[in-house]
Image (cartoon, rainbow, N blue to C red):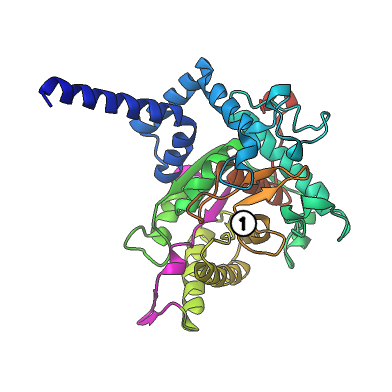
Amino acid sequence: MDKRQIFGAIAVYCLGLFLGCFLSVERLTPWYESRTGEDDVTLKGLRSSRELSRSSGLSGAMDGMDCRLAVLFNETYKDLSKCRNSAESDKPASDLAAPDDSPYFRTAYLNADQAERRKMAYEVYSGLKQLAARPKGFYPGTATDFGLQIELAASAGQSASAQDPAKKAVKSVLAVGDSLALGLAPSLEKSLQRYEGVNFARVGKVSSGLASPHIYDWEKNVPVLIDEHHPDILLVIMGVNDANNNIRFGDIKAILGTPLWPEAYQKRVESFLAAIAKKKTPVYWIELPVVRDVEMSARISLANEAAKKACEASEGCRFVDTWKLLTDDKGEYTNFKKDDKGFNIRIRAKDGVHFSTEGGDLLSEYILDYISKYVELKPKKETEQHI
């Protein structure tokens, strides 16, 4: 093979790689954003490419092809939420079909616009709330897969404060935590755009946690972050990495799986929350989700229980129960939820730990709905929401 052939092969490979990335830019952009949390040159380039793909119609064409083949991928990895549109040719197969007057079919997803996908998640969440209010045993068919036993009311011991007549208006929200926080942050930011004058900031550190201050010392840095961003409320999403680490508790090393570990972790959380309490910033601790690995889920459950006890004992902290929202009707891990029309919505990433875009949107709506019981989030006028 001469040099011309070698350079030709390299050129073809590079062209193929570029086209592959460009065609997958809708998936690459949120994936990269969730793992870096930084507005760097690469992310700006991905966003520009995504806008070019959408404006050229290529994104819509790719979605159209996926939707026409949707029946081949039902119950698998394909995200079918983008297939809900009003175009006759893009309707799902008959076994997934809903009535033509269904609100899901009146929503267009032809260009995979994130604003429309956001609207879909909000509609699904609104439907979930309505269904959850029905009497037990009322749910027909596949709708039961949507986890309809979720308790949407505030958890026990916290509901009394929900009736406080004076709610403080929220103008600034700060989310902090590990890679789960980074993954959820884009959905929270999008959901908060429905409210008037709310600024959103996020600070996430991959592989961090309260058990590993050598990676990032959250207890030391959270007061600095509060001074920098001046949040009205603080959202904390962390602990997955903690659930996989031993913890130093004074001179004692608390080993995973021993009775001392939950106690040590609770002390860690209490100390972290005490640093926040000094700043008099209300904090909402978001419960960690179930994960695919059963043993890891058991450890996460222990971390959740310890964090909940610490939160209940700390001034200005509320624990947001979210476990059931992301499980199936048996309380177990699931990649998919079914909406009330029987459509699959992928809620988890392929790693079995993080959230999909739609799962993040669903969870963010749940969190903001819970928070609105205690603070004022003023919705924008319908014409201003752009969803």
Q: Position of residue 358 (x, y in %)?
A: 60, 42
Q: Position of residue 337 (x, y in %)?
A: 67, 50
- Res 216 seen here: yes
Secondary structure beneath dot 1 equals: loop
Hey, which quadrant is residue 148 in on the image?
Answer: bottom right
In the image, 295 versus 78, the foreground residue is: 78
- Which image quadrant: the N terminus? top left
Hey, which quadrant is residue 106 in on the image?
Answer: top right
Look at the image and say whether residue 236 sits in the magenta stretch.
Answer: yes
Residue farthest top in this picture: 56
Is the residue 116 above or below the residue 161 in the image? above
Residue farthest left in this picture: 2
**Amino acid of disc 1:** Thr
In the image, 3 versus 188, the foreground residue is: 3
Q: Position of residue 182 (x, y in %)?
A: 47, 47
- Res 112 seen here: no
Look at the image and say whether residue 341 sits in the magenta stretch.
Answer: no
In the image, 11 versus 314, the foreground residue is: 11
Q: Position of residue 147 (x, y in %)?
A: 73, 56
- Which image quadrant: the C terminus? top right
- Looking at the rendering, the stretch of residues picked out in magenta corresponds to 228-256
Q: Residue drawn at (43%, 68%), measured in percent from left and top? A: 244
Q: Residue drawn at (63%, 50%), measured in percent from left and top? A: 336
In the image, 51 versus 159, the foreground residue is: 51
Residue farthest front in this picture: 1
Residue corresponding to mark 1: 334
Other residues around mark 1 within 10 Å, as few (<14) / some (14–19) / many (≥20): some
Going by the image, does 101 lie left or right of 337?
right
Is the residue 57 above or below the residue 161 in the image? above
